[in-house]
Image (cartoon, coloured by chain):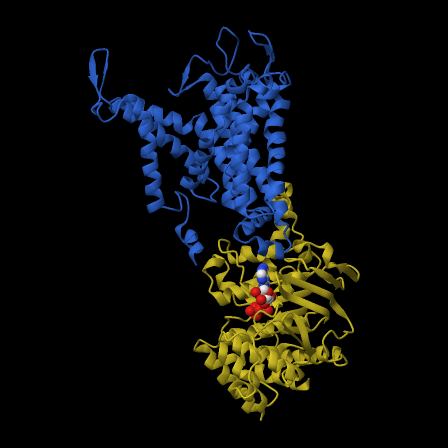
Amino acid sequence: MTDSTDRIEDVSGRGGLPTDMGDTSAEVKARAKAAAAERAESVADVAQEPGSKKPDPILVVDQVSRSFGGLKAVDVDHLEVQRGIITALIGPNGAGKTTFFNLMTNFDTPDTGTRQFTSDGRSQAGARKEYDLAKFPAHKVANIGMVRTFQLTKSLSKMTVIENMKLGATKQVGENFFLALLPFIWGKQERENEKRAEGLLARFKLDHMRDEFAGTLSGGQRKLLEMARALMVRPELVMLDEPMAGVNPALKQSLLDHVKGLAEEGMTVLFVEHDMDMVQEISDWVVVMAEGQIIAEGPPAAISNNQAVVDAYLGSHHDSALDFGDGAAPVDDVEGSNVEGSNVEGSNVKGDDDAMATDAVHDVDTAADADADEGKA
Amino acid sequence: MDWGTVFSDTLRAMFGETAIVFALAAIGLNIHFGFTGLLNFGQAVFMAAGAYGLALFAAIPFTAPGGGDQAAWGGQPFWVSVLIGVIGFPVLLAIVLGVPTLRLRADYLAIVTIATAEIFRLLARSPSFDAVTGSSDGLTQFARPFYSGISCTPSQGDCWFNPEERYLGLFTGNQMWLVIVGWIVVALVAFAVWVLMRSPWGRVLQAIREDEDAARSLGKNAYSYKMQALIVGGVIGAIGGMLRAIGTQLANPDQFITDVTFFAWVAVILGGVARVFGPILGSMIFWAVLAFSDSFLRQSVKRTVSGEELGFIPESIMTTNQAGLVRFILVGAMLAALAAFRPQGILGDKDEMALDDR
Ligand SMILES: Nc1ncnc2c1ncn2[C@@H]1O[C@H](COP(=O)(O)OP(=O)(O)OP(=O)(O)O)[C@@H](O)[C@H]1O
Ligand SMILES: [Mg+2]
C-alpha cells in the first residue's frame, strides 16, 4: 500500500497541477498522503478474498441477483463496501457493473437478495442509521445519502449549468408547489445553494460555463458537471460510473484529485473505471467483477498481480473489445505476456489502455506515465 | 373591400373570448408539454371539466316541455359550482389519467388523454344522461350570476355595462365584462406560471422533461411532480373551458371536440414551447389570422349585395361558404412555413432548440 501513496506524490508533483484548495501544495500533499495512508490502514487487515468482511461497511450486499432472460447479469453472494475509502469496481464489459449500480440505487430491482446502507448521520445530521434499500425507491435513495452518476452522462441539456447544479440540492423548500409561489420563502436557501454550486463549479473548472446551457458542454465537461451536481446532494456514498471516460489527461488528473478530496472530506466513493492507471492511483480497495460475480477483492497492488483478474479482465476485456467473444485470452498472446512480464505497477495495464485508445491525447497520457515510472526508478 | 370590418373582425378575435379561452388552454398545455414533457392530447377534456363542472351544478333545473327533469344536478350556488369546475373536476380527472400512465413512457399518457376526451364527449352527448347533461343540446342558464348587476340595460338597473351597447366598437356589454375578467385571469395565471418556472419547483419539472432518471438520482420524486404538473396544467385548462361556457352561456359536447385540443397545441407551438408568454401570443395570433383570412376572403368573393357587385374572386374559384374553409388551408400553410423557417416558434430560441440534436 505504501507503493500507492508514493505514486500519488509522483503524480501530483509532475507538471505542477492545480490543487484548487487554496493551501500551499506542500501542505496539500502532506495532508493527502496522510489521509491516503489512513484510508489504506482502515482496510489493511481485511482478507483479500471475494465477499470479505470490512470493519465499518457503509454498504452490505447479500445474495443479490438479477437476470435478464437467461442471462444472469448480477449474481453477488456477498459484498461489503468500507466506509470512508475509495473503492474501485472493475471488470470486463458486460460484467454487470452498471447493473449492480442500478440495483443499489433502485433504478432496477434485484430478483433476490438484500442491500443495506448504513448512514453515519453526516447527511442526515443525525445518528447512525441502517436502511434496508429495498424500502427506498430511487429518489429516496438520494435523500438518505447515496448518489450515483450514469455511464451515459445525463446532463439536462436545456437547463443552464448553474440550474443543473442547483437541482442537486436536497430538502429545498421551494420544491413544494405552494411554497414555490412565494419566492421570499425559498429565496435565502436558493442563494445559499447557488453559492455552494458556484464553489463546486470552480473546483471542477466549469465556472466559466455557469450560464451556458448544459447541452453546449463537451462530453468530458458533462461528465464533470454530472459529478459536481451529484455532490450538491451532500452524499455519504458517491457511486460514479466511469467518471473519467472521455476526460482529457490533465483534467483527469484534477478529477482524480477531486475524488481523493471527497474521501478526505469523509465521503465514501465507489467507482467503475476501465483505466487501470486511474484505478491504481486513487483506489484504496478494488473489487473485481466478471460475469455478474465478484471474483476478487484486494488493495490495487495485489489485484493487478492476481492471475484470475488478469485472465478474466485484462485478457478477456481485450478480446471483447475486438469482438472475439468472451473466451479466455490465450496465455502466449502479446497482451498477456506483457502483463506477466511487467512489474506490478502501471505498465501491466498498458495493453488494456492501448486497446481502448483511439485519440492522440492518450499518447500524452502514457508518455507521462512512463516519465513517472522513470522518476521512481 | 371594407377594411374597417376586416380589422375589427381581426381585433375582436385577437382580444375576445376565444383567444382568452385558448390562451389558458395553451398555458396549461405548455406546463404539461413545454415544461414537464408530458404529452397531453386531451386538453379538451380538462376544458370540458371546467365548463361542465360549472354548468352541471349551477344550471337552473326545469321540466322539459315534453315532461322529464332537466339539469337534474343543478341549482347549487354559483361559487360552489365554480370551485367544482376549476378545482374539483380537473384535479380528479388528472389523478384518474395520471395514476395509471405517469409511471410509464410519455406516449401512454398521450393515448389515454386522447381517448378520455372522446369518451367524455360521447358520454355527454348520450341521451341516457339527458336529464343531467342535456345530451347534445348541453346545458344553459348557469352563467347569469356572472353578469348580474354588472351588465344590464338601464331599465334593469344601474350597471357597469349595457349588453345593447358596443364597447371599443368591438364587444357587447356582456362580452366586454368577460373580456376584462378573462384577460385579468390570463395575466394572473401567466404571472403565477412565471414565478413557478423560476422556482425550485419549476426547475424539477424542467429536469424531468430533460431526463427523468437524472432527476430521480438527485432525490426528486418524478412521479409526484409529473402528477402535480398534470393537475396544474389541467386546472388552468379548466379555467379556460369555464370561461368559454360563461361567454357562450352554454356548455355542450361540441365545444370540446378534438380540434379544440389541437388548436391549443397550435397556440403553444406558434408562440414558442416552454416560454411563459408563448401560448398567449400564440393563441392571439392564431385566432387573429383565422379571423383576418375569413373576413378578408368573404369580402373578396364576388357577390351581389342589394344590386351592387362586390369582390374580385370569381365564384368558380370559391363561394362565400367555401371561404370559411379556405382560411384553414391558409392557416395550415402558415404553420408549414413556421415549421420550415421558425420551428422554435415566435418567442422560442433557435440555439436552445438545436441542443436536441447534439
Ligand atoms: N435492461 C437490460 N435488458 C437486458 N439485458 C441487460 C439489461 N441491462 C443489462 N443487460 C445485460 O447485462 C449484462 C451486464 O451489463 P452491464 O451494463 O451491467 O455491464 P457493465 O459491467 O456495466 O459493462 P461496461 O463495462 O461495458 O459498462 C450485459 O450482458 C447486458 O447485455
Ligand atoms: Mg457499465
Chain letter for blue?
B
Q: In this view, does B107 lie above or below A132?
A: above
Percent position of residue B87, x then y: 62, 31
Q: Is residue A275 above or below residue A147?
A: below
In front: B26, or B323?
B323
Q: Is residue A23 toward the left or the right of residue A350 in the image?
A: right
User: Which residue: 55% across, 42% down?
Assistant: B109
Query: Residue A185 sits in which quadrant?
Result: top right
In front: B167, or B175?
B175
Query: Residue B167 sits in which quadrant?
Result: top left
User: Which residue: 60% across, 90% down?
Assistant: A343
Q: Quadrant of the N terminus of chain B?
A: top left
Q: Is residue A67 toward the left or the right of residue B344 in the image?
A: right
Percent position of residue A263, x then y: 67, 72
In front: B34, or B278?
B34
Q: Quadrant of the C terminus of chain B?
A: bottom left
Q: Can residue A228 be seen in this view?
A: no
Q: Is residue B98 above or below residue B8?
A: below
User: Which residue: 46% across, 20% down?
Assistant: B175
Total marks shown come to 0
Q: Is residue B32 above or below residue A202?
A: above
Q: Is residue B270 visible?
A: yes
Question: Ligand 1 appears in which quadrant?
Answer: bottom right
Percent position of residue B286, x then y: 39, 34
Q: Chain A is drawn in which colour?
A: yellow
Q: Is residue B321 toward the left or the right of residue B229 in the image?
A: left
Judged from this view, the residue extending furthest toward the front is: A70
Percent position of residue B177, x then y: 49, 21
Q: Is residue B247 toward the left or the right of residue A172 in the image?
A: left
